[in-house]
Amino acid sequence: MNLPDIIIRVVNVDAGYDDVAIQKNINFDVRRGEVFGILGGSGCGKSTLLKHMIGLNEPIAGHIYIDGDDIVTADEATEARILRKFGVMYQSGALFGSMTLLENVRLPLEEYTDLADDTIDLVARMKLELVGLEAFTGHLPSELSGGMQKRAGIARAMALDPSILFMDEPSSGLDPITAASLDATIRRLAENLGVTFVIVTHDLGSIFVATDRVILLDRKAKGIIAQGDPRRLRDESDDPRVRAFFRREVEPMAA
């Protein structure tokens, strides 16, 4: 693979807090335009790794390159440039409850651009239309279903036209039909807009429908125990830990 095809590169990362490593020597690449999943059981460090990737917390060791720039060692100006390249949708959607959907999506545009007010309004409406919420611009988050709130969170994360979207457990708390609709939205945005998605999840339905490639973290191993196409990992892996995750089987030693 040519280097320009890689938009994120994680190199020798020890993920954790202070000097306590949850995962050690993590290495993987994310290809431009793909939907990439970070998988694993509870407490394995998925969200911790995500926080390192978005610059929220510094890893114990290693480097994380976002479109060629290392977010770990970046100076203030470089970090600001890196942060403009991606958006983040948190598990709860993180919408401001006192603001309408339109006002929520307008917020990053007001904060980080010099666009005229009517242009900001137009762009915000376009982002909501992309996720099927054009008819709900004046609604408060509390007036919407959980799935609609998640889609609104995606619209806001896309406000500044990032090339990467990071998502933390996007289908958490959703019923299967609503989760499937959200998965379809993610696939459509990736294919139509060329946006790269990095998704932390343990939802098997979403994994097999939405993602192109994944890594599987293991808490006991403190590392990546599998990576690749999740469908091939499910069908072909002879590692009992991988089978236990993808097929919901009980590992022999845990029985």
Image (spheres, rainbow, N blue to C red):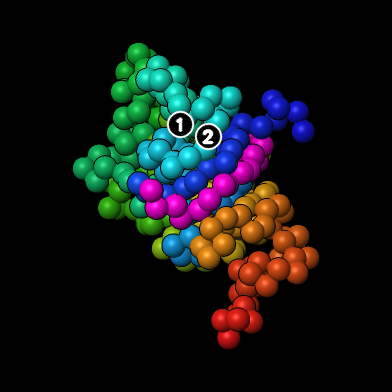
Residue 31, compared with residue 187, is above or below; it is above
- Mark 2 Cα shell of 10 Å, populated few (<14), some (14-19), many (≥20): many
- Most extreme residue toward the left, as rendered? 98
- Looking at the rendered structure, the secondary structure element under dot 1 is loop
- Mark 1 Cα shell of 10 Å, populated few (<14), some (14-19), many (≥20): many
Q: Which residue is drawn at 62% across and 78% down?
A: 251
Instruction: Describe residue 13's horizontal placement relative to residue 225 as left or right.
Output: left
Residue 46 in picture, x, y percent from top left: 48, 53
Q: In terms of depth relative to the viewer, which is nearer, 147 or 32?
A: 32
- Looking at the rendered structure, the secondary structure element under dot 2 is strand
Q: Which numbered disc covers residue 63?
A: 2
Residue 86 in picture, x, y percent from top left: 48, 32
User: Are discs 2 and 1 less than 8 Å apart at CB?
Assistant: yes
Instruction: Describe residue 117's horizontal placement relative to residue 58 as left or right.
Output: left
| Among the two numbered marks 2 and 1 on one chain, the one whose residue lies closer to the N terminus | 2
**Residue bearing the label numbered 1:** 72
Q: Which residue is drawn at 38% across and 48% down?
A: 19
